Image: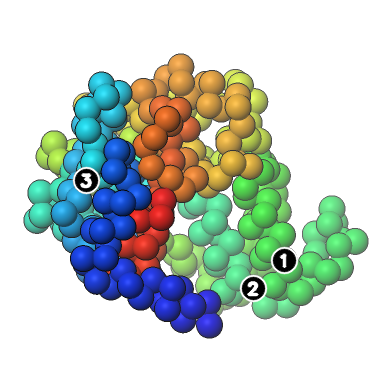
Amino acid sequence: MKRLFKNLLSFPCNSKLIFNLSENLLHRSSGGYILSFHDLSPETFETHVNSLKPSEPISLDELIKRYKSGKSIKNCFAITFDDGVEETVMGNWNICKKNNWPVTFYLPTDYLNGENLPYQKIQIIEKLLNKYHLPEKIKNKTQLLSKKNLIKYLTDMLYVKNHETINENINYFLKLISKNPEYKNKNLMPKAISWEKVKDISKNSLSSFQSHSVSHTACSSLSEKELKNEMLTSKKTIEDFTGRKVNSFCYPYGSKRSISDLSVQVASKYFETATTLIRGRLKNSNLHYLPRIDLYEEHPISFVRLKVALS
Ligand SMILES: [Zn+2]
């Protein structure tokens, strides 16, 4: 129903003419923006980007350079992908290469070093957890005996809690799943891209690998010392592997409640830019609190255009 509504709402944007018209009317003097993608198929990605013509992708660095110097960024956007899932990076990198599109991949370095992302663990719990008891600490929250409530509880935790609290909760349920011989020792979660492949892709100047922290923890849950570690360690690791400068940071989860003022301050010490998942265009933007427009697999072209036109 929700999808039907979205499709109906965005029907006029099926027409390229109407999309161009609304772009021109709404964004006469500005226009630049950053797209954010997560896991989506190369076919959908290519269709989404092509649907935004005559706007063309340029590199994030170039977009920021033009924006900072006051040059026009009308009809320009940058492409970014978060999280470094191997299948996503490889498939979509091929599309970027084929079309000559510059692209930025934000990497959480612990994931590439073998530790799965917290939300991937929750997806496994959602998919595979059967019967369960609650761990001692949350034993009284009987509403969590409904799996739907449990998943919501764990997911909400991701946006505001630190690594230890999240792992303590998630690992309890993962352990229950791994007791099932069917799933034991099986790699159930999406694989991260390898450092070898990052190294190889980064030889091509169309690509850019930037920091998405070490552990993909909500920055609002971290102390100054922890923030510094998340930012600097990931920056150095990526620079060491690629031999190229890391000058941009992407806040994990990216919404207001996952980003503290302190994290913006720390990011501005070590990076030229930092990106959020707060929707918008580059217009009076804080360079360390940059908006992005996030697009997903299920969005039809008309909705992509509507979202971009209204951002
Ligand atoms: Zn992320």
Answer with mark 3 or mark 1, whichever residue precedes in sequence. 3
Q: CA distance from mark 3 to mark 1?
A: 44 Å
Residue 201, picture quadrant: top left
Q: Residues within 10 Å of mark 2 (few under 14, many from 20)?
A: some
Q: Residues within 10 Å of mark 3 (few under 14, many from 20)?
A: some
- Residue 278 spot, x, y in % from top left: 49, 45
What residue appears at the point 24 percent right and 71 percent down from the top-left corner?
Answer: 15
Residue 244, picture quadrant: top left
Look at the numbered disc 3 and give the secondary structure of its residue: loop
Residue type at tag 2: Leu
In the rendered view, tell whether residue 256 sits above or below residue 71.
below
- Mark 3 touches mark 1? (CB < 8 Å): no
Which mark, residue 241? none
- Residue 7 spot, x, y in % from top left: 41, 76
**Mark 2 lies on residue:** 129
Residue type at tag 3: Asn
Residue type at tag 1: Leu
Pick whichever, 128 or 96, lies toward us: 96
Is 224 on the left or on the right of 254, as rendered? Answer: right
- Mark 2 touches mark 1? (CB < 8 Å): yes
Answer with mark 3 or mark 2, whichever residue precedes in sequence. 3
**Mark 3 lies on residue:** 75
**Mark 1 lies on residue:** 150
